[in-house]
Amino acid sequence: MRLTFATPDQKRTGAYIVFATNGGKLSSSADQLDKATGGALKRALKNRKFTGKKGQTLAVLGPAGVKASRILLLGVGKADKIDDLAAQALGGAIFRSLGNSGDKTASVMVDAIKGMKMTGAEFAANLAYGCQLRSYRFDRYRTKEKPEDKPSLNAVAVMLRDVAGARRKFAPLRKIADGVFFTRDLVSEPANILFPISFASRLRALAKLGVKLKVLDEKQMKKLGMGALLGVGQGSANPSRVVAMEWNGAPKAKDKRPIAFVGKGVTFDTGGISIKPAGGMEDMKWDMAGAGVVSGLMHALASRKAKVNAVGVVGLVENMPSSNAQRPGDVVKTMSGQTIEVINTDAEGRLVLADALWWCQKTFKPHTIIDLATLTGAIIVSLGHHHAGMFVNNDKLSDQLLAAGKGTGEALWRMPLGDAYDKQVRSQIADMKNVGGRDAGSITAAQILQRFIQKDVAWAHLDIAGVAWSNSDAGTVPRGGTGFGVRLLDRLVADHYESK
C-alpha cells in the first residue's frame, strides 16, 4: 500500500477520514466538511450512537457537496490520552474500516486537536505507521482469489500542514515496518518452502542493506562441537545451518562489543521421536518465529542505519522423526562442553539455543544477549496470548525491556529464575536433562538456557510461544504471523544502546 503526506485538499476523490473527540466534538477538518456537505455529519451524529469514543467509526456515504465517495468519522477519545500507540491504533482502524470498502484511495485529514500532547507531525506519522502495519497480507499462494475478495484500498494520503515534519517522523517508522513485514513473511511461509537452507538464502537480502553474513554448515558446526543443535536436526533430510548477521552502525563507539540477539529457528517441529499429536501440527511451521524476529530486527536496524553495533544469530534446524533421528535417552555434548540427556525430543528449542548462544558469545563477545524462542507451551498456560514471558539475569535490562514493551504495545511479563528450579533438570547420567517435568516448564527451560550464558553478559530470554501467531485481527496486527518482538527490540536499541 502506498502512503504519502500532502497539504490539506478537499478536492480529492475516494474516502475522507476525519476525527472527533469524546462527546462527538468534531475536529476542524470535520467541521469544514460538515459545512461543505450541508450538515451531513452532524445529522448523522444525531441519529447514531457515535460519541467520539476511541476507535468508534461513523460512515456517511455519497455525501453531497464534496467529491468524496464517503466520509469516515473516527473517534479518538480523550485528546490528552492520544500517544504513539493510540495514534497507531487509529491508523489500524482506518485500514480495518476501509481496506475492503471498495475505495481505492483514502485521504486522512489531520488537525491539531486541542489538548493533544503530540504534534500534528507526530500524530500523522504514527497514524500512517499503524495503517501500514495493519495493511499486511500474506497471499503469495492464493491463485484463484476473486478481485472483490482482495483489499481495494491501495493508497492513503495523510494531509496536514507540516508535511516535511511528518515525512521526517515517518521515515524510521517505515523502516521498522519493513522489518516487521520481513518477519511476518518468514513466519507465514510453509515448511516445504522455508527450511534451514532456504531460510539462510532469504537472509542474503540483508547484505544489500549493509549487513555482514556468516553461514555455518553442518561440517563446520560438527568441528565446533555443536552436538546439541546437530542432534535436533539429524533426523531431517534438510541440513541444519547457523547464520550470523552483523550490523556495525557505531564503529567509533568506545565499547565496540555488540548487543546480540539469538533466535530459535526450528523451521518445522514434529516433536521428533516424541511426536506431537496430529491436530494442529501444521502450526509448527512458525516454530522458527524467534529466528524470524531476529532477522526482521536486523533488517530494521540496518534499514534505518541505527548507530549501534549489533549481531543476530539464528539456529536453523528441522525436527523430524526418522531412522536417524535423535532418541529419548540420548546424551549430547554441547559446544560449551556441558552434556544434556535428551528425555523428550520435543523439547528441542533449548538444545538449539544452547549451542547458538555459546557460539555467539565466543565469536562476537557481546555485552548483552537477548534470545527469542517459541520455547514452551507452558508460557501460554501462564500468560495466554497477551504477554511474552521474560527471564532475565539483570535488573537494569529487565527495566529497559519492560519499558520498551510498554512503549510499543508488545508486552512482557517478568518470570522468576532461581536455583531451586535447577533441581528439576538434574540428570542421573549427564550434566542436565532437557526437561524438568510439567511443573514450571517455562522456568526450567530458561534455567537450562542460563547455563550457557557467560558470567559477564547481561542476558534475557523471551518466550514468545503465545504471541508469535494470532488467530484473529487486532489493532495493527492482522491474523497470522505477528512479528512480535521487532518493534520491541528496535525500541530497546534506540532508547538505550545507540550512539548519540
Image (cartoon, grey):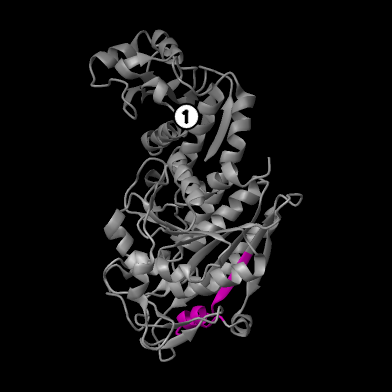
Residue topped by disc 1: 106
In-front residue for pair 500/82: 500
Q: Total label count?
A: 1
Please tell me which residue is depicted at 37% across the width and 88% down the height of the picture: 329
Residue stretch in magenta? 226-244
Please tell me which residue is depicted at 48% across the width and 71% down the height of the picture: 451
Whole-percent x, y for residue 269 in the image: 39, 73
Q: Is residue 314 visible?
A: yes
In-front residue for pair 99/239: 239
Element carrying mark 1: strand
Judged left or right of residue 208, residue 355 is: left
Q: Quadrant of residue 144?
A: bottom left
Whole-percent x, y for residue 6 in the image: 59, 24
Please tell me which residue is depicted at 57% across the width and 32% down the height of the picture: 4
Q: Is residue 485 above or below residue 448?
A: above
User: Dot 1, how many residues are within 10 Å of its Cα: few (below 14), some (14-19), or many (20+)?
Assistant: many
Residue type indicated by callout 1 = Ala
Is-magenta flag for residue 224?
A: no
Whole-percent x, y for residue 187 in the image: 46, 60
Q: Is residue 493 above or below residue 284?
A: above
Whole-percent x, y for residue 468 in the image: 40, 56
Judged left or right of residue 145, residue 381 is: left
